[in-house]
Image (tube, grey):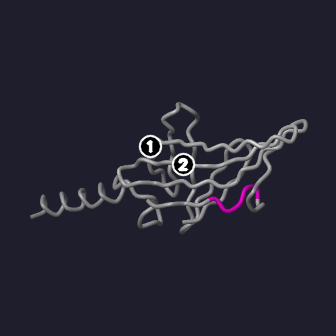
Amino acid sequence: MCRIMMMSVALAFSAACFGGGVTGSSTVTGEYVLRTVNGAPLPYTLPGTGTVKTELLDNVITLYMGQTFSEVSHSRTTANGQVTNQTNNETGSWVPLGSAVIMRGNNGGPEVVANFNANTMTIVRQGMTSVFTK
């Protein structure tokens, strides 16, 4: 009887510690839409030099079951009066880490840490704080 009880406790501990969930969240999967960059609403003008202006128009990150993700963003660059629209796509995998997830893109770029608070995801990369909501 004692052996069964010890195995039950060990199994419950393993499930709690290694269950793959993000602390304080029942699920992080879903679609997250970019709302602000450095506290400013979209479109956000990215820092740059000279007369070239690049604006981030939107960004959506979707975290899927099976720990994969996709990210789609749109930007607009204006140079010498010429406007160019761009679509950027990224896919990869994610792993839980406490109240965050670590995203690894398939393009081999740097890992990205996304912190969660309820339905809000915050990412800090390249000196910019991006806030997404579900």
Q: Which residue is mark 2?
A: 71
Which percent across, then down, holds residue 93? 44, 43
Q: Residues within 10 Å of mark 2 (few under 14, many from 20)?
A: some
In front here: 71 or 127? 71
Secondary structure state at the residue bearing disc 1 = strand
Which percent across, then down, holds residue 100? 52, 54
Per the image, is 55 magenta?
no
Which amino acid lies under the numbered mark 2 shown in the image of this protein? Glu
Q: Which mark is residue 93?
A: 1
Residue 102 falls left or right of residue 20: right
Q: Which residues are magenta?
A: 34-38
Which amino acid lies under the numbered mark 1 shown in the image of this protein? Ser
Q: Quadrant of residue 58?
A: bottom right
Q: Which mark is residue 58?
A: none
Q: Give the number of the mark in front: 2 or 1.
A: 2
Q: Residue at x 23, y 57 (%)?
A: 11
State whether residue 128 is above or below residue 9. above
Q: Residue at x 55, y 43 (%)?
A: 89
Q: Main secondary structure of the magenta part?
A: strand
Q: How many marks?
A: 2
Real-space Cα separation, disc 2 to disc 1, in angstroms: 11 Å
